Amino acid sequence: MAGETRQRVVIVGGGTSGWMTAAALAKLLQDRCTIDLIESEAIGIVGVGEATLPHIRGFNEKLGIRESDFMSWTRATFKLGIEFRDWGRIGDRYIHPFGTFGRGKGEVDFHHYWTRLRAAGVDMPPLESFSYACTLARMNRFDLPSTDPARLASTYGYAYQFDALLFAPYLRALAEGLGARRTEGKVVEVIRNNESGNISAVRLESGQEIAGDLFIDCSGFRSLLIGEALEEPFEDWSRWLPADRAVAMPCHTRTEVTPYTSAIAMPAGWRWRIPLQHRTGNGYVYASGFISDDEAAAALVASVEGEPIADPRLLRFRAGRRSRSWVGNCVAIGLASGFLEPLESTSIYLVQAAITALIELFPEREVSPVDRDEFNRLIDLEYDRIRDFLILHYHATQRSDTPFWDYVRTMPVPDSLTEKMELFRSRGRIQKYREGVFLDASWVAVYVGQGILPEGFDPRADVPAENLMQGMAALQSEIRDTVSAVPGHLAYIDRYCAMAPS
Ligand SMILES: Cc1cc2nc3c(=O)[nH]c(=O)nc-3n(C[C@H](O)[C@H](O)[C@H](O)COP(=O)(O)OP(=O)(O)OC[C@H]3O[C@@H](n4cnc5c(N)ncnc54)[C@H](O)[C@@H]3O)c2cc1C
């Protein structure tokens, strides 16, 4: 009987977003929906997207995925943060860690004490030397965080770097095991109800029609349902995020398998380095107005460390998002809803955020307009915050060595970002929010790492400088001593989640 009242969900697209959605709905809303997923092998998936944020662990846990199994399957490594090189100035290096600075539980945030000493004229070591996560990353070590909040080893989280081509098949096996049905084929027509305008079915090249109550657009950059059929406008943010292309090329690993992703600034954008168990992912994200495709590909080839495994592959995109991600009975998830470049590995996080909101607000029979509006509000919030965070990386630079860096340094930025920067500059404060991604320590890492230093500090940090200096020196050596006893990153992987021999 339950089957008659279940919503028929049709997912168009079987990339990371399609199969994440299918697996999550099949696991968590089993009694409330049936799931059909349509994908086309001839079209394929975007196949990049190898670095993640710690939130993905919560997603996997909800789905009952065993970490060691998942990591072994997707040939994953651990990720403690992102290293930024040459961003503020050529030669600069800092890590945005998935963790706090200091012990993370003082009266005020650690960077206020650090600023307090700087204000007193003390020549302070870099902020990252007071972060357990950064020190682990720099020393190329890894262990799972401690659950004891009294220990320094509890002050960080972690994410994964994995093979994007292996993640969707992993989730597919899970989703199909839970009852999701997959149809191979190309969608050639979207059929709409004349009166409501809602989507009633999609037609495949074979002539088969698949009908549904709720349609999830996971068709990637094509945006087949929400963009092409429903014509929801795209808000273009390329004036702030001018990178619109990437050239990607994996190579054999020649140096360390680091527990972090690297983002190295380049003349017209930046280059990623993502070490996996079996290879290293590389790519140059660039603004085509400032460099040609051939020049970008040549610069990438010249900079990778090991023997290339494939030819350079070009990807095109545009920064921005659909004005609304949920329109009528169609919800767009993943690249179909929008794209923010991979500088902070946020796309898969956005997929997860949309799935979480959809499950919260999942329709009973009819779509409720207030629930739909709430979904759109939540997704807008996520996009807007990430957008500002990304713009900060480009804008907070002293570089003027190429026209690209001149442009981003001097471009007008959204008011919402100007307010955040002013708040930090004045007394080191971070605009607070309760939900969403990139909390205080992330903003502090990037502000300080790129040379935006607070002029003042929280008065509660105004404790005697001598006591502070002693406490900080003790903290630094405790971090170093504790990290020295932690296993190497690869040794940990070998023991815990080594990939199956191919
Ligand atoms: C250069 C680059 C680097 C990136 N790096 C990261 C990163 O480090 N971290 C991160 O989180 N994200 C990253 N991303 C984003 C990440 O790759 C995507 O968010 C993720 O792969 C989800 O893609 P998708 O499933 O929405 O789309 P796709 O993978 O493109 O899947 C689209 C699906 O729709 C199907 N389809 C399309 N048209 C039709 C049709 N007519 N009929 C039937 N099926 C159809 C396709 O067959 C495919 O199955 C990166 C993206 C780019 C471009």
Image: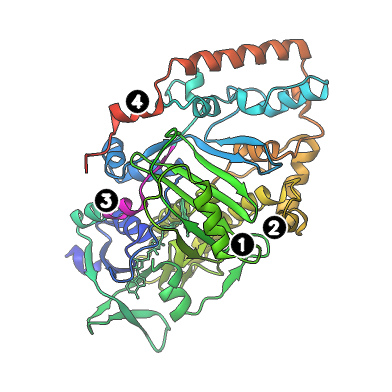
Q: Residue at x 31, y 37 (%)?
A: 67
Q: CA distance from mark 2 to mark 3?
A: 39 Å
Whether the magenta-drawn stretch holds residue 211 is answered as no
Q: Which residue is mark 1?
A: 287
Report which quarter residue 377 is drawn in.
bottom right
Q: Residue at x 43, y 83 (%)?
A: 197
* Crowd rating for badge 4 (residues with CA inside 10 Å; few <14, some 14–19, many 20+): few
Q: CA distance from mark 4 to mark 1?
A: 39 Å
Q: From this view, report whether residue 120 is shown above or below residue 226.
A: above
Sooner in the amino-acid sequence: mark 3 or mark 1: 3
Q: Which residue is mark 2?
A: 404
SS assignment at label 1: loop
Q: Residue at x 73, y 22 (%)?
A: 124
Numbered mark located on residue 170 in the image = 3
* Crowd rating for badge 3 (residues with CA inside 10 Å; few <14, some 14–19, many 20+): some
Image colouring = rainbow
Label 2 with label 4: CB-CB less than 8 Å: no
